[in-house]
Amino acid sequence: MCNQAPFSGLEDVMLGYIFGQRKVTEVAHAVWKKVVRKGDVVIDATCGNGFDTLAMLRLVADENSCRGHVYAMDVQKEALESTSFLLDRSVSAGERKLVELYAMCHTKMEELVHIGDVIRLVAFNLGYLPGGDKTLKTLPDTTLLALEAATRVVAPGGSLISVVCYLGHSGGREEFKTVESFAAGLPIDGWTCCKLQTVNRPLAPVLVLLYRK
């Protein structure tokens, strides 16, 4: 039997994106489903309003065995409160226990990882908190450090770093260039890196995927 490519089965969501019917974040979530399994450990490096955290929890939660775990972090108290509120009203008490929220910078994600954790996914949704203070945002220098940390924590043998970059705000394009340059520099024998970008919408969000073989 032939092995399927790691991202096969994404035709519907990709066509939806091409025809303007799907957001880039929906593509990201669809890709996650091809990588993450029940019981995995994942990291939401920028939890924001919690929608990525919730999506990740639904992928890993295995209440029968109390396995699966999400580490979610953000530097803004408002983001952590929004994420906590969303989780409390969206999942069972058992699933809620599988998420840990931390008020910390994504550059410090390695401090959260326990010995024996197999990190299958690290997700970044860059920029500022939607509906929050637009002057508080991720920055190229710290994002670079966080990406370096992410490459050290994700497990070999089929794991993913997912990055959604926003170009429309001040500094957003510079941050995207930092992400793109970092991805381009990863060795091809261990990584497959690609981006999803709309050519005629120069300010549209860009999805960058770093897949560890």
Image (cartoon, helix red, strand yellow):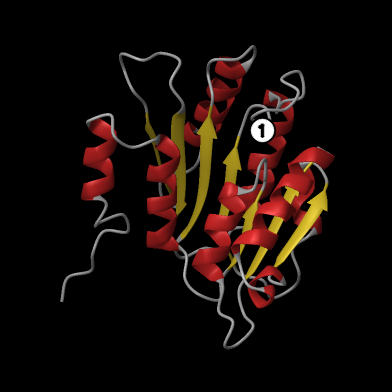
Residue 170, image x and y in percent?
64, 11
Residue shown at the point (60%, 61%) measured from the top left = 90
Picture quarter with the C terminus: bottom left
Label 1: how many Cα within 10 Å (few below 14, some 14–19, many 20+):
some
Q: Quadrant of residue 193?
A: top left
State the residue in front, 84 or 165: 84
Q: Quadrant of residue 112?
A: bottom right
Q: Quadrant of residue 188?
A: top left
State the residue in front, 149 or 64: 64
Question: In the image, is 134 to the left or to the right of 166?
Answer: right
- The residue most toward the left is 1
Picture quarter with the N terminus: bottom left
- The residue most toward the front is 89
Secondary structure of the residue carrying tag 1 is helix
* Residue 135 seen in the figure: yes
**Residue 167 position (above or below residue 78):** above
Residue 111, image x and y in percent?
81, 57
Query: According to the image, label 1 marks what residue?
Result: 144
Residue shown at the point (76%, 55%) measured from the top left = 110
Residue shown at the point (53%, 29%) measured from the top left = 165
* Residue 213 seen in the figure: no
Q: Amino acid at mark 1?
A: Leu
Residue 83, image x and y in percent?
70, 50
Residue 15, image x and y in percent?
21, 39
State the residue in front, 30 or 161: 30
The mark total stands at 1
Residue shown at the point (33%, 23%) measured from the top left = 198
**Residue 156 position (above or below residue 198):** below
